[in-house]
Image (cartoon, coloured by chain):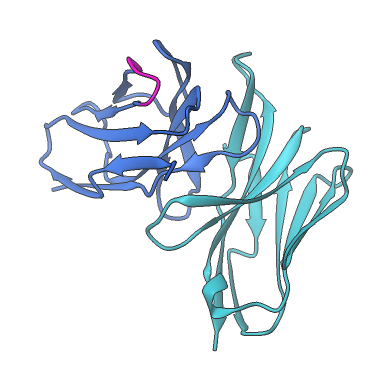
Chain colours: A blue, B cyan
Amino acid sequence: DGGITQSPKYLFRKEGQNVTLSCEQNLNHDAMYWYRQDPGQGLRLIYYSQIVNDFQKGDIAEGYSVSREKKESFPLTVTSAQKNPTAFYLCASSPRLYTGELFFGEGSRLTVL
Amino acid sequence: SQQGEEDPQALSIQEGENATMNCSYKTSINNLQWYRQNSGRGLVHLILIRSNEREKHSGRLRVTLDTSKKSSSLLITASRAADTASYFCATDAVGLTGGGNKLTFGTGTQLKVEL
């Protein structure tokens, strides 16, 4: 089945450690996105990618990094520079940048101990 | 800052009743979308309404858009316990950085449908 796969579902990290969240899609979509969700705050855009080997900062990119070496993959690294990384992270894709609906993965919940 | 704000923040109804939630936004848009999120899961797209449309239906869902008031409403008719979820509106607006349209999500309405 076509869709977006995020892994891991749950992740625990100690302060000072970098962690990488995986996002893979087999929908043949050009655009991919990372959102952060905190309770009561809706979704905030971290990074987005319009096409392979290209990505742009969103509203809250500080402390995060991404890569887009393959069309199918858009991993997100939460670095130790992110002050408050505990959150629910959602990856999404669309055929082209912000045209129509976004297709979301099931999310990854990161907890910093 | 959030472009869309949903109202109410939380809504509790009985099965079979209708549920109405509203979304207000600040700037001109090209389209407005509604998404649903079950607890701890990803978002699922429900419906998209363009700025030149006033009303749209999809099954038990009815969405209205009033661009003069910068508001939209989502009506779920004959609600079911399975409709229990959070509902988000998302609006597109020209990106401030000039990088194309940007989709901005509201804070959501938590709907609980009780048996």
Q: Which residue is at the front of the view, B92 or A54?
A: A54
Q: Is residue B38 above or below residue A41?
A: below
**x then y, percent, for residue A38:** 40, 49
The answer to which quarter of the image holds residue A79 is top left
Q: Position of residue B78 (x, y in %)?
A: 70, 79
* Main secondary structure of the magenta stretch: loop
Residue B88 visible, this angle: yes
**Which residue lies at the image location 45% right of the left edge and 30% below the top edge?**
A33
The residue shown at (33%, 34%) is: A23
Horizontal and vertical percent for residue B92?
Answer: 67, 33
Is residue A71 part of the magenta span, yes or no? Answer: yes
Residue B108, image x, y percentages: 56, 56
Magenta highlight on residue B42: no
Residue B26 visible in image: no
Residue A76 in the figure: left or right of residue A104 = left
- In the image, residue A52 above or below residue B84: above
The count of marks equals: 0
Q: Which residues are magenta?
A: A68-72
Q: Quadrant of the N terminus of chain B?
A: top right
Q: Quadrant of residue B9?
A: bottom right
Q: Seen in the image, is A72 located left or right of residue B90? A: left
Q: Residue farthest to the bottom?
A: B115
Q: Which quadrant is the C terminus of chain B positioned in?
A: bottom right
Quarter of the image for residue A86 reads: top left
